[in-house]
Amino acid sequence: MDDTRKDKIERVLGIYTRLMNGNTVRKADEAMRYGVDERSIRRDIDDIREYLERHYEETGLYTTIVYDRKEKGYRLEDTNIMKLTNSEILAICKILLDSRAFTKEEMTGVLRRLINGCVPKSERKLVTDLILDESFHYVEPRHKTPFIGTLWSIGQAVRNYRYIEIDYTRTKDRSVVTRKLKPVAIMFSEYYFYLAAFIDDEEVRQDFDVINDSFPTIYRVDRIKALRVLDEKFNIPYRDRFEEGEFRKRIQFMYGGRLQKVRFTYSGADVDAILDRLPTAQITDEDDGVYTIAAEVFGRGIGMWLRSQGSFVKVLEPKELVDEMRTEIGKEGELYS
């Protein structure tokens, strides 16, 4: 081994040792210690940083070199934990696959990058094998529309309060309409991503059930045929801001509409499943295993969900919902009081 290479190795090991011992390393001090210029010390520090990154790839333990402006030197910052554990990554992969939210190509790419970016190299095959069957038989949504790029553009518009204009395929007649919108949120529910936005067109709002509705209209992102982020900005006063979390707790199947209170009885075996489905729900009474439950919800989606519960549910109010269900059934069935 030539003397230059030997000196380089000793210098790098010396700097690495001082960093591992918790010392702050300054380029000028190290250059004087070893009789080299500061550029050599900078390259040494870069070599150590690269080694630490490879160490993270193999073990999942994240340690890096940071510059401390107060101390005017370099030190180690050791989180000593994995960003995500293998179990957490496996759970996330399973949830993603079950969501069926993306095209097969998008899903495959997301899973691959998630595993390669977060799982130590030695464990990647194990995690990949555990989801292999589900990923191979993955059934993509019928719309087959890639939209991840659109999601990001919408997110930026939401963050920067920028108007957007969309060409959108309506559900009822499949016609394409153009809407100028104030985007306020992106949400996910039952296989699809949705945009929540206020329509900036009074003529369009004339057809609404509630003309001055203070809650946004819901659009499926995969049905957006074209998206244009406009330079124009909008303003929503703080007191009128859209609270995505509160809205999400009160909506079923992403069917918008007016806010209403529902009350029903539930006689099934697992009332926790009902309370988890309806985050605003409260048990107001219980009699011999039959629970009376009240909840605050938006729109017509609640009727769809209540019908799905079959004979375990008996709707008590509102009267409009009871009447609507009776009309659909065509007779007064045992599900509805």
Image (tube, helix red, strand yellow):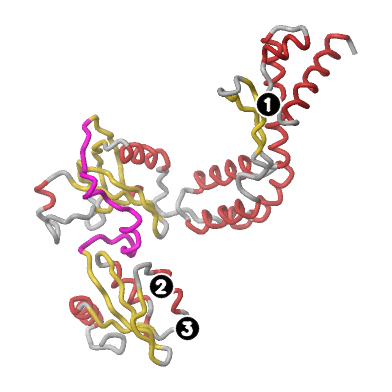
Quick one: label 1, few (<14), some, or many (20+) residues within 10 Å?
A: some
Mark 2 and mark 1 lie on one chain; the one further toward the N terminus is 1
Say what secondary structure mark 1 lies in. Answer: helix
Q: Amino acid at mark 3?
A: Ala
Relative image position of residue 185 (x, y in whole percent): 32, 48
Say what secondary structure mark 2 lies in. Answer: helix
Q: Amino acid at mark 1?
A: Arg
The outermost residue toward the right is: 1
Question: Which region of the structure is painted magenta?
Answer: 232-258
Q: Tell me the number on the disc at residue 275.
A: 2
**Which residue does the image show at 75% across and 25% down from the upper left?**
18
Q: CA distance from mark 2 to mark 1?
A: 50 Å
Q: Tell me the number on the disc at residue 269.
A: 3
Q: Which residue is mark 1?
A: 49
Relative image position of residue 248 (x, y in whole percent): 34, 59
Name the residue nearer the viewer: 99 or 117: 117
Find out whether residue 233 is within the magenta segment: yes
Q: Amino acid at mark 2?
A: Leu
Mark 3 and mark 2 lie on one chain; the one further toward the N terminus is 3
Quick one: label 2, few (<14), some, or many (20+) residues within 10 Å?
A: some
Q: Tell me the number on the disc at residue 204.
A: none
- In this image, 4 relative to 52: left or right? right
**Which residue does the image show at 77% across and 12% down from the upper left?**
33
Q: CA distance from mark 1 to mark 3?
A: 57 Å
**Which residue does the image show at 19% across and 47% down from the upper left?**
199
